[in-house]
Amino acid sequence: MSQHPGPTHRTDAAEHGTSPWMPAAIALVFLLALAMLMAHLGRFPLMAPDEVRNAEVGREMFVSGDWLVPTYNGLPYLDKPCFFFKCVAISFEAFGVHEGAARLPSALSGLLLLVAMYLFARRMYGGRVAVMAVAIVATMPFFVVFSRLVIMDMMFTLFVSLAIFAGFLGEEHEGRRRMLWHLAGAAAAALATLVKGPVGFLLYWIVLTVFFVCDRRPRAILRLFSPLNLVVLFGLVLPWFLLLSERHPDFPHYGIVRETFARFTQGEVFRRRKPFYFYGPLIVGACFVWSVLLPGAMAAAWKARGNWMRADRLCVAWACAVVIFFSIPHSKQPGYILSIMVPLGLLVARVFAAAMEGTCAPAVNTVRRGTTALAVLCLALAGGIGSIMLFPADATHWLHCDRADLDAMLPHLKSLVVTSVVFAGLAAFVRQRRSVCLAFLLFAAFFPVLAWAGFGGLEAYAETRSKHSVVGRMPPLPPNTQLVSLQGFSLYLPFYMQRTLTLVTEKGKELPSNYIPYYLSITEPWPPNVVHLRDQDGWLAAQARPLYVIGNKYSRATLQRLAEENQVEIRELSHGYFGVLLDRAEEP
């Protein structure tokens, strides 16, 4: 990476920003991004627990019109703020209640992030790097998957990235423009906070503080924490926090102490305790084929660190700060480090751009070795998939999956083997030709082609894993039938039946929420649609309207007794879930 005049002078901006092929390249890359993020968005059923829960929270917000207090199964769901769920509710209002509408806010967030990254990279590095960076990130499986899930991580990443970009750009100007950029960054950090809590503004502060320290600009840190920035940040967040605290006085303790502090100190509370090195292997899988370039890219960049541009230092500080920050706490989740796909994509694009110029030998060697590694990776992938096809019984132990899930995918695995072998041959050919442009196209094409070849297998896997079919296996229900869940909770029923259930429980831990059990532990009496386990028999006997009682293997004995008492049969709805219809005449 060569040094250019001025701290932010972009790479070959003049010629590449106006090259005749640039409009076509931009259009092609964003068409690829649209296909990766939007194609068949509603084709797969929602997956448990996150997707079905978040979609149902959005649906209930859409039905109730209460944007302040999210609810799940009619109970307050304060595990996360309201902004993401409101976006899902708006999508339902515009397009109807279905899987595609539920996933649309995440997909649009991913697309907007690519646009923001393109604009930032074009300003800092020029058009060539910007186009390649978008192509790189849009073909990273980690980015694609989170853009297609009903989960707030992609929207959170969008706002955090916008805040970081704005804070960086603010220091590229003086006076009023600097102030406005910083205010925009504070506003974006506030939206990130409304999506996922205090980590929104903490990550914004940490990344930019680390960058300004590395860039030896202590005054910029003071401007980052200027009173006006804090007024904008907390002026957008505090009204929501105070109004919610007024409705639920327990929320400040839960939101700050349990949901935020406990995640950093007590991973076992949330059953997410992971080792310190958890994110290392995850980054390799998240970047997929691009990861074979990372070691060489990091080595080449470190050797040329004296010539780094200011944006290069931002990317390095961003990636390192995020990984270290989230590696310290006990509680770890893959989505926590989603934002590092942006700086990693920019840095890999810089390596390819330098290699295409032909003036940076380390970059050329990195691409060349990476192309060789791609061929080896493709052959290894083909061999691994072939082993699964030959030894499916053993593969269930290797992959820690059910045989039914694997059997659903087996007919579709052959196309993945063929695709991998073909790309291994192409990588060997490109390596022999020593073409950097062809190497980039090969890297960018592999995951989209592999995803297309394996789409049928993914669909079969999703259908097998999802238990949304439980709804279709239920018998016709009389009008006004109340759904009752005994000591278990089929997560798919509220969304796919578009109604809440009465839950018979001891502590409410069957629900995919950390807040609801806490809420029930401090609430007396319980809400009408939650019945304590000790009151189960009395409550069931007192009901006059029809009941459809659903349970799992732990409540099978109770279901059997109810079936015998009412002379009806138990119906198996899915593996491990059973239902009994108690068709009682309603009292006049």
Image (spheres, rainbow, N blue to C red):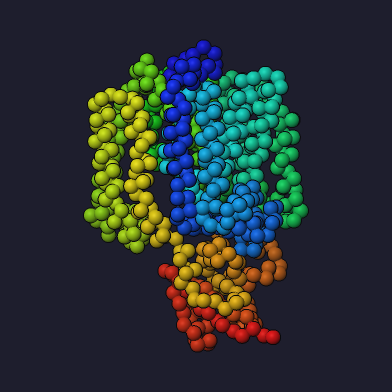
Q: Which of the two residues, 375 or 128, is positioned nearer the viewer here? A: 128
Residue located at (54% from left, 43% from top): 108
**Disc count in the image?**
0
Q: Is residue 238 left or right of residue 460?
A: right
The answer to whether one can see residue 587 in this image is yes
Residue 433 horizontal/vertical position (percent): 25, 25
* Furthest residue in direction top, as rendered: 5
Q: Is residue 430 left or right of residue 302?
A: left
Q: Which of the two residues, 410 or 326, is positioned nearer the viewer here? A: 410
Q: Is residue 381 left or right of residue 314?
A: left
Q: Which of the two residues, 18 or 330, is positioned nearer the viewer here? A: 18
Q: Split into 4 quadrants, where in the image is the C terminus?
A: bottom right
Say above or below: 417 vs 307.
below
Say above or below: 233 vs 524.
above
Q: Is residue 586 left or right of residue 314?
A: right
Residue 553 horizontal/vertical position (percent): 46, 72
Residue located at (44% from left, 74% from top): 572
Residue located at (71% from left, 31% from top): 229
Residue located at (34% from left, 62% from top): 404
Say above or below: 468 vs 21.
below
The answer to whether one can see residue 376 in this image is no
Q: Quadrant of residue 501?
A: bottom right
Residue 82 horizontal/vertical position (percent): 65, 50
Residue 164 horizontal/vertical position (percent): 59, 31
Say above or below: 9 vs 79.
above
Q: Split into 4 quadrants, where in the image is the N terminus?
A: top left
Q: Which of the two residues, 492 or 249, is positioned nearer the viewer here? A: 492
